[in-house]
Amino acid sequence: MKVREAMAKTVSSAKKNDKVLDVARKMKQEGAGFIPVVEDGGLVIGVITDRDIVIRCIAEGHDPRSETAEHLMSREVTIISPDDDLDEAARKMEREEIRRLPVAEKGRLVGVLSHGNLVQATKNKTAEKVTEGVTRGA
């Protein structure tokens, strides 16, 4: 099965100059703990998680009303193509110990594949193995 068959196609994103408070509100509205950061045209340049907001902003004493997404985002982003197999996505999630992958074509955001999407799509041992990898230390 291909990533495009399992990924969420409706994806919220942030711009690097968006305030962290606005990113957090978008997460709340979407029920998401992960927002890709894109430049004009949808080019993925980073990601922000709810954990990033807590650890890198609030716990460090920064003001989420003035701090920007650019200062919190993780810049080394593991991306997957919509044409890759779900097994490849599972290997990336397990190896990187991550729960979500931005899906991009030519670097441009087209979706997100979450661990939950993977579990629902595969319902097999692949998902169980990834669960062990992405939940270490959680």
Image (cartoon, rainbow, N blue to C red):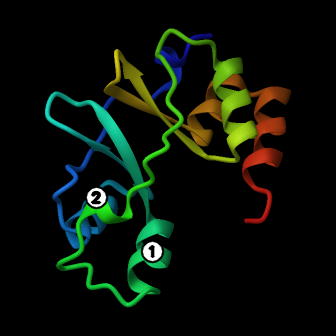
Q: Quadrant of the N terminus?
A: top right
SS class, disc 1: helix
Q: Nearer the viewer, residue 33 or 67?
A: 67
Vertical arrangement, residue 13 with respect to residue 17, above or below = above
Farthest bottom residue?
61
Can residue 127 be spotted in the picture? Answer: yes
Quadrant location of the C terminus in the rendered image: bottom right
The x, y position of residue 118, in whole percent, is 63, 31
**Residue 21 figure quarter:** bottom left
Q: Secondary structure at mark 2?
A: helix
Q: Residue at x 82, y 38 (%)?
A: 128
Q: Is residue 59 above or below residue 89?
A: below
Q: Quarter of the image holding residue 2? A: top right
x and y percentages locating residue 3 in the rendered image: 53, 18
How far apart marks 1 and 2 lie (CA) works out to: 12 Å
98 or 4: nearer the viewer = 98
Q: Is any atom of residue 8 visible in this view?
A: no
Side (left or right) of 80 relative to 53: right
Q: Front-most of 81 and 2?
A: 81
- Give me the residue at 16% from left, 28% from top: 41
- Point out residue 48 in the picture as x, y percentages from the top left corner: 40, 56
> For the residue marked with disc 1, what is the amino acid?
Arg
* Residue at horizontal 72 percent and vertical 49 percent from the top: 134
Q: Which residue is mark 1?
A: 56
At label 2, the amino acid type is Glu
Give residue 6's position: percent from left, percent from top: 52, 23
Please give the residue where the numbered disc 2 appears in the rendered image. Answer: 70
Q: Is residue 32 above or below residue 4?
A: below
Label 1 Cα crowd, 10 Å radius (few <14 / some 14-19 / many 20+): some
